[in-house]
Amino acid sequence: MADLDAVLSRVRERVLPDPDERERLRATAADLTERTRAAIADLPVEADVVQVGSTARGTWVSGDRDIDLFVRFPADLDREELEEYGLAVGHAVLPDGHEEYAEHPYVKGVHDGFDVDLVPCHDVAEAGDLISAVDRTPFHDAYLTERLDDDLAGDVVLAKAFLKGIGAYGSDLRTEGFSGYLTELLVAELGGFRPLVESARSWHPPVEFDPEGHAERTFEDPLVVVDPTDPTRNVAAVLSAENLARFQHYARDLLANPREELFEPLTSEPFDSGAVRDHLDRRETTPVAVVFDAPDLVDDQLWPQLRRSLDGTVRGLNDRGFDPLRARAMVDDDGERAALYVEVETATRPAVERHEGPPVAVRKHADRFYESYADDVDPDTYGPFIDGDRYVVEREREFTTVREYLESDAAGDIALGAQIEPPFADRDVLVGDAVATLADRFGRGLREFYEPHP
Amino acid sequence: MADLDAVLSRVRERVLPDPDERERLRATAADLTERTRAAIADLPVEADVVQVGSTARGTWVSGDRDIDLFVRFPADLDREELEEYGLAVGHAVLPDGHEEYAEHPYVKGVHDGFDVDLVPCHDVAEAGDLISAVDRTPFHDAYLTERLDDDLAGDVVLAKAFLKGIGAYGSDLRTEGFSGYLTELLVAELGGFRPLVESARSWHPPVEFDPEGHAERTFEDPLVVVDPTDPTRNVAAVLSAENLARFQHYARDLLANPREELFEPLTSEPFDSGAVRDHLDRRETTPVAVVFDAPDLVDDQLWPQLRRSLDGTVRGLNDRGFDPLRARAMVDDDGERAALYVEVETATRPAVERHEGPPVAVRKHADRFYESYADDVDPDTYGPFIDGDRYVVEREREFTTVREYLESDAAGDIALGAQIEPPFADRDVLVGDAVATLADRFGRGLREFYEPHP
């Protein structure tokens, strides 16, 4: 078995930016900073510019090409002006850039091959004075810069490469994984990448770290890392239980069987329809898919709505007796179509369903139940009869096939996201082998579904 | 709507024995008592004879033809001699009789058209000195005789006719209903039939009566009537929650809509195979039946074993995902064949089944689970993957059709009664429309199944 140190040293060679890459980035960042200062000089207010994020701290994974520049305006500048001046600077520095929106609108663009974010914020004196969430970033930056020496910075890069490799990196709401800031805090707190994975393999969630020992509230999340710059914030709030478990699994795996491939994202070919059909034959389940136009939203808005829709669909299938086995939301690579994909264990149910009434002894309810189903009222119902101490009827079931249900209005009576509702109303419903045709668009999601790994 | 008093008065006319019937019974009982005394005179020990039961107390329903005579031997007579002398008297009085077995063997026979039981017991001074359970009967008899005047005796007959009409009369373990003694105690305690049903309609089980106020323990049963002759015994111990609920249902029904038919047992034709098929078409369920030779046992031994076997079969079907909807044990009129009859909602399951492992954080269990299903060990399993905080696999399902399961050894791995096991091993399994052929033998049970009522 390979030695962990040897593996890590080979990984380091691959993922740590070399002097050339560092120099290229430094030069580009310096140039951008200069241009930003020039643009600021044209404004009627004072401001300064600060480079933040992993490329500022030397904790980026080789090949990442993100430069984040924050333009700090006076704390008393009102929001409207801040946004106006912020965009003015952004467009001046990145003439081909476009506007995006976080807490404030900001400009994103490409410069010398780097992806550049030019974000306006308020220059507050302490983290406690934040006006908006982006104002926090320079404090994060300062905190980490002070604590990460070159060794720890190198370990942060290892940790990020590892989390990318296992698919748990990224705090966007599609991934629900580890943010860069979270990763850096954990490496700083535990003293390196190896101590981090050695610790993680035996965590018993909920696990809490509070580097500054200043937590001002309790948190319900499986992993809690109290923000050193904000005693009321859990830096790991977005991390799902699943990604935490995944990290623990692969931490153990790495320590038990060190190997470089754990630091490389799985790249696998999308499934074709034949592969889907092979799995359906082997599994003997009934696959169903509800397919509709994906609303034009950023992942952070789209995915929570897709997940809610998927959960509602699974619950609806379950309540109607179609026994969902496993489910996944999918979006095609172009972001054009979305699919709620579910395998159910049974696609049909009988014409009757059991419906339990109250105990006969609970007279008022019992009388009402009995009378509402008595022979002369509802001759198609079996019963009421007595089972144990209760009235029971077998009444007509509303949906006897999974298709009837998914095509019915009832399938839309779930908590869909506001922007999912309109395209969901025009949904296509596929049942059985017909889902194999989805491989054209959703081949990647289908592969992940049928080749699941931790 | 008919008036309850008018209905009861018409029912009384039908169910209360008329003077002729009473005289015929009195004469026959006197004759039998005389013959019994003569037989006792031939024994080397002293004994007396006492007539007990409803025909002794004038609380029988017209047409019942049971005479119970108890031969009381000295309390110090040992068991062997009691049985020997008891059978000697029995055979002398009822030369064509046969032996049956309760606590002791006894002789049962027909005399002048009456069904006669001649039962030996010990003549103990107080109920507290009982040697065996049958010794209690004369105390029951004495207690009731003292409390039931002619009016109450008439109401006992009404109550028995009502309980027979609704199918809840009889303390045998097939019926699990109201015994005669229980019925008489309830009528005595509540002061008549009408007060009894008026009380019952609003009972909230557990309901407890203790006529002598001397209970020496607590009971778990839904209805408790502490035996006036034994403070540790619940006279209603055999009564099922279902029959108690049935009694409450029909008590309300009678009071809301008084009618004579409630005092007449439902007589309905057995189902033929066409009727079964009609219901199957309407219900779209899959019926399954496990049919085997009924062991040659009295109902009190057979039915608890059948019920246990039915419960185990239903549990097995449920655990395997075949979703039983309703079930019933049946025995044909000749007592030759027995059927465990179940309708399931789904007769097939996919080739894979979900199997949840431990939370990833519980390291020892998690490691063991993961390793036992890892790719190189079990390539046919999907996963282990992570769902929430746990490992999950989809592994091969043992039985994908209900027939495979019912024909397998696993279907016999349930708590069958000792005497059910051998014939169960030679079972026939019917699935789907084939069950319609069962109408030949089990037409009555099938009608009760498909025309259920309270």
Image: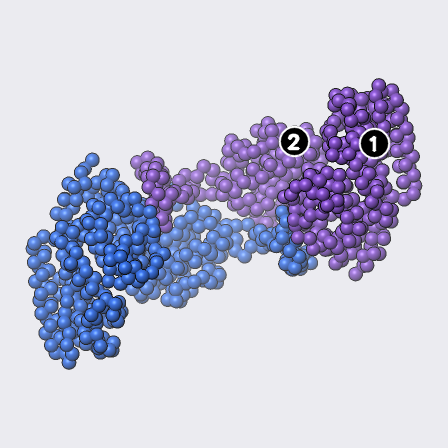
Chain colours: A purple, B blue
Q: Please tell me whether mark 2 sits on a helix, a strand or a loop.
A: loop
> Can the viewer see residue B336?
no
The single residue placed furthest to the bottom in the displayed view is: B44
Residue depicted at x 13% and y 50%: B151
Residue B371: name its quadrant. Answer: bottom right
Above or below, B173 relative to B166: below
**In the picture provided, is A253 more to the left or to the right than A8?**
left
- Chain identifier of the residue bearing label 1 in the image: A
Residue depicted at x 58% and y 44%: A343
Q: Earlier in the sequence, mark 2 or mark 1?
A: 1
Q: Please tell me whether mark 1 sits on a helix, a strand or a loop.
A: strand
Q: Nearer the viewer, residue B321 or B429?
A: B321
Q: Residues within 10 Å of mark 2 (few under 14, many from 20)?
A: many
The kind of residue tagged 2 is Ala
- Chain identifier of the residue bearing label 2 in the image: A
Residue B441: name its quadrant. Answer: bottom left
Give x and y (percent) for residue B141: 18, 62
Q: Which mark is residue A294?
A: 2
The kind of residue tagged 1 is Leu
